Amino acid sequence: MNEIFSPAHKPVPHESAARHAAGSALYIDDARQPEGLLHAWVITSTRAHARILTLDLAAVRAAPGVVATATAEDIPGTNDAGPILAGEPLLAERVVTYAGEPIAVIAATSLAAARHAAGLAAITYEDLPAILTIEAARAAAAYVVPPMRLERGDPDAAMAAAPHRLTGRAEAGGQDHFYLETQIAQAEPGEDGALHILSSTQHPTEVQHIVARLLGRPYAAITVEVRRMGGAFGGKESQASLIAGMAALLAHKTGRAVKLRLVRDADMVITGKRHDVQARFEVGYDDAGHILALDMEIALRAGNVADLSGPVLTRALCHADNAYWLPDIRVRGYACRTNTVSNTAFRGFGGPQGIFAIEAAITHVAAALGKRPEDIRARNAYGPGRDITPYGQPIGADNLPRIMAELETLAGIPARRAAITAFNATHATIKKGFAVMPVKFGISFNLPSLNQAGALVHVYTDGSVHLNHGGTEMGQGLYVKIAQVVAQGFAVSLDQVHVSSTRTDKVPNTSATAASSGTDINGMAALAAVETIKTRMAEIAARKLEGDPADVVFADGRVFVGNRSLAFKELAQACWAERVSLSATGYYKTPEIHFDQASMSGHPFYYFAHGACAVEAAIDTLTGAARILAVHIIQDCGASLNPAVDIGQIEGAFIQGLGWLLMEELVWDADGRLQTHAPSTYKIPTARDVPPVFVTKLLDNAPNAKPTIFRSKAVGEPPFMLAIGAWLAVQDAVANASSWECALKLNAPATPEAVLRALGK
Ligand code: MTE
Ligand code: MOS
């Protein structure tokens, strides 16, 4: 068999790799500019919570180059951009609820003109009391969705009966997405009120819906298109609709094409981030370190509106077990309403916060017992007879025991641990730490209705294939993976398959490309379309080759019946001549899943993606600086569709996680204004932060037990949480430098200041 015609499971490059490297991949800001294109800028609130007393834009409108301004009053439909709940205005009306909230938008003949004019807005406010922190919101019982509770067994009785009990807390900060391409949309009016929108969005259908709602137009009048994003990471799941909404409003008002591109500072101030988290826990445990009871609170800072905070909190609660059997458990969740930017989806979608919380609790147990944290982790692992999650879903196929065993060898754990102990015995200022941790991540959207996808495939008479589906490309390699599926299905070469922009007029009613499920659901939808076309083609092939349709085989760029064959292209031509359609849609919905939000129970995930890491860190006890010295990762990608892309996802996710846990720090001033809104003050990881030893391995011979697309497993988010292992290794280093009492005070991010504080310096 010729390998070229079976590209699935091969490490082929990302479909745009060469164009990315050459700078010829087109992003929205590179798109050919329509005639008369206007450039937009946003006027934002400078107050965290205030009544708008006067809003005077006369000087703005009179400024050179300004063509139009728009406020909430100019919205012809409903001023609501809420993705799930109603009441989340696109532009503030009368009251502002965070510093940075859009109040008005400007369209001008150049970006510079729009930007200059914004400074001429005259706005007066009457300040109102602002709630800025999780503590303040908890004290006021201010939440964006009702508090949640996930409970199993009798945690109170189990706690009372446990030989030991402890309480503790842990906090992790938020995180800016810092996609390289900032938020952008370009809206172009067409005939009869139609609008074509180029949007850097993970969710074209939602942009379509929200723009239609804002303008009071039918969905069918709005077309949203995205070829690729320059990174998204969850930040363009709901937030992109705000940007597209503002561009669409100005296009509607002016009748001209309008582009809104946020510069970095504006992007960081205006759009939502990862939720910071405060966790408190009481743990009941025995001498061996078995956790017998857990009572936990997870409080997220949601910001001024709900946005996606409800589902984010649900996922946090559904990951507070991580990979551990916790028989009697209660987890309460709070999405705190604050006068800060509305936090949103970010790689892991609440999972990182839930897993961070339980890992912190486990470390507390280890410290109290004077045992190694990884031994407590192993002690509490899911296993036979203890393999049902707190929300009632059986773990199913569990590759973690194998992963942990192989990691022991891959990382040389015993020798490494001995070397670290020896190092620490002979070094006074530099101290090393070590951590081993597993991750279990549930794959599927918690809301079952979102787990559906569609695709559109055409075969042309020269044998080339046009592929479209509802998933979006944000750098994660979705397009190449789906193209591999289609090429494999037709047994044609990958370069015969042409991927095309995601568009709401090609594949309608799609879900966000999120929850790591892009390949799972769009791959199956595309394969369904391929199978439909193949069935039709097989009829013709059987006739031409004098055989039975059931005996037709697509292989090596040809179509066979026994040893008689036709080139794929010849068959395509023959189908056309016989008047057989070579175009089909495909559809897929994930089977088996259900979830009851009220009782927080059910089977929300089709399967789990597992991984584990071993991390060696060092801290400088004089400066507090932490370095990650060695990382070994084994991740279960099932039968990986593309090992090169998957390794890239694991490495990228881990380094992005390092940013969250070790260096990225968001700082607001006492008035609720974000101080860290540019790379000058907000430190993201760079090439220098990549650990000198960074070994990433896919678990081999591990086809998904579930019939996913070619038995692969999702990879986009799960490895992000492995970086919690880096934070644990730094914490271990702090313990080795001082004491566990000090180390347990360490929060995330473990910046040099935080490390010094934990050391009591
Ligand atoms: N990888 C890159 N390069 N850029 C991104 O924006 N987003 C992540 C992940 N990997 C992202 C990425 C997030 S948050 C998700 S949910 C998945 O990709 C989405 O894509 P998938 O479902 O196709 O894995
Ligand atoms: Mo990813 S946070 O589900 O977009």
Image (cartoon, helix red, strand yellow):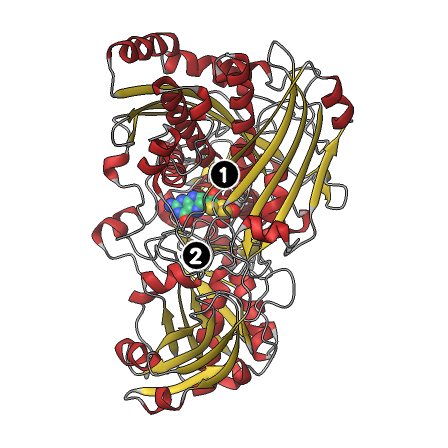
Q: CA distance from mark 2 to mark 1?
A: 60 Å
Question: Going 59% across and 61% down the picture, which residue do you hit?
Answer: 83
**Residue that carries the numbered disc 1 in the rendered image:** 171
The percent coordinates of residue 596 (x first, y second) are 75, 44
Depth check: give the residue in front, 46 or 702.
46
For residue 30, side relative to residue 641 (left or right): left
Can see residue 486? no
Question: Going 35% across and 89% down the picture, which residue do you hit?
Answer: 59
Quarter of the figure that contains the N terminus: top left
Which of the 4 quarters of the picture holds residue 556? top left
Q: Is mark 1 within 8 Å of ligand 2?
A: no
- Which residue extends farthest front? 761
Relative to 477, say whether 162 is above or below: above
User: Which of the two discs, 2 and 1, labels the residue nearer the N terminus?
Assistant: 1
Q: Which amino acid type is marked by label 1?
A: Glu
Q: Mark number for residue 374?
A: none
Depth check: give the residue in front, 243 or 192.
243
The percent coordinates of residue 445 (x first, y second) are 61, 45
